[in-house]
């Protein structure tokens, strides 16, 4: 089944599955502790994981496209990702 997918696509999907698993585990931990302070700490830790996964999957995708994308477009993509992260953090 996995042979029909490209290696880049498979790695990007696995990182997204990992990210989703972190979200589910965080939700279960919030329910387990049943404490607002701990819930905020757990939720805040997810604020680090989300942008990190975004950067990693974007970098993997761009590496896979590096032979078919111009340097100018590459700069625009990195600028867009940087602006998304800046907007989320501020």
Image (spheres, grey):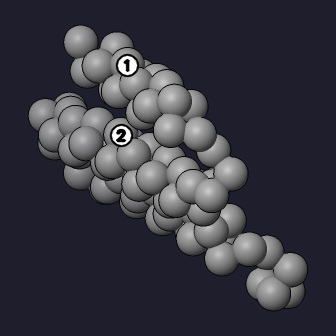
Position of 74 with respect to 30 (left or right) is: right
Q: Position of residue 86 (x, y in %)?
A: 29, 19
> In terms of sequence position, does the residue under pointer 2 or pointer 1 come before the other?
2
Image vertical order of residue 58 relative to residue 79, above or below: below
Image vertical order of residue 75 relative to residue 64, above or below: above
Question: Can residue 19 be spotted in the picture?
Answer: yes
Q: How many marks?
A: 2
Position of 16 with respect to 49 (left or right) is: right
Q: Position of residue 11 (x, y in %)?
A: 57, 71
Q: Position of residue 56 (x, y in %)?
A: 41, 54
Please tell me in which quadrant of the rendered image residue 13 appears. Answer: bottom right
Image vertical order of residue 8 relative to residue 76, above or below: below
Q: Label 2: which residue? A: 51
Please tell me in which quadrant of the rendered image residue 32 appears. Answer: bottom left
Q: Secondary structure at mark 2?
A: helix
Mark 1: few/some/many CA within 10 Å (<14, 14-19, 20+): few
Q: Of circles 2 and 1, which is in front? A: 1
| Residue at figure coordinates x 40%, y 25% from the top left | 79
Residue 60 vs residue 47, the one in the foreground: 60
Q: Position of residue 5 (x, y in %)?
A: 79, 75
Q: How far apart in space, not on screen, are marks 2 and 1 (Cα)?
A: 11 Å
Position of 64 with respect to 30 (left or right) is: right
Q: Label 1: which residue? A: 83
| Residue at figure coordinates x 81%, y 87% from the top left | 3
| Residue at figure coordinates x 51%, y 30% from the top left | 72
Residue 44 vs residue 6, the one in the foreground: 6
Residue 53 vs residue 83, the one in the foreground: 83
Q: Secondary structure at mark 1?
A: helix
Mark 2: few/some/many CA within 10 Å (<14, 14-19, 20+): some
**Where is the C terminus found, in terms of image quarters?**
top left
Position of 38 with respect to 77 (left or right) is: left
């Amino acid at each position: 089944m996995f042979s029909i997918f490209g290696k880049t696509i498979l790695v990007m999907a696995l990182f997204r599955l990992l990210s989703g698993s972190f979200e589910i585990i965080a939700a279960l931990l919030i329910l387990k502790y049943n404490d607002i302070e701990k819930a905020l700490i757990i939720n805040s830790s997810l604020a680090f994981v989300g942008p990190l996964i975004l950067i990693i999957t974007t970098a993997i995708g761009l590496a896979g496209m590096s032979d078919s994308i111009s340097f100018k477009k590459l700069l625009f993509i990195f600028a867009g990702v940087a602006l998304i992260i800046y907007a989320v953090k501020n």
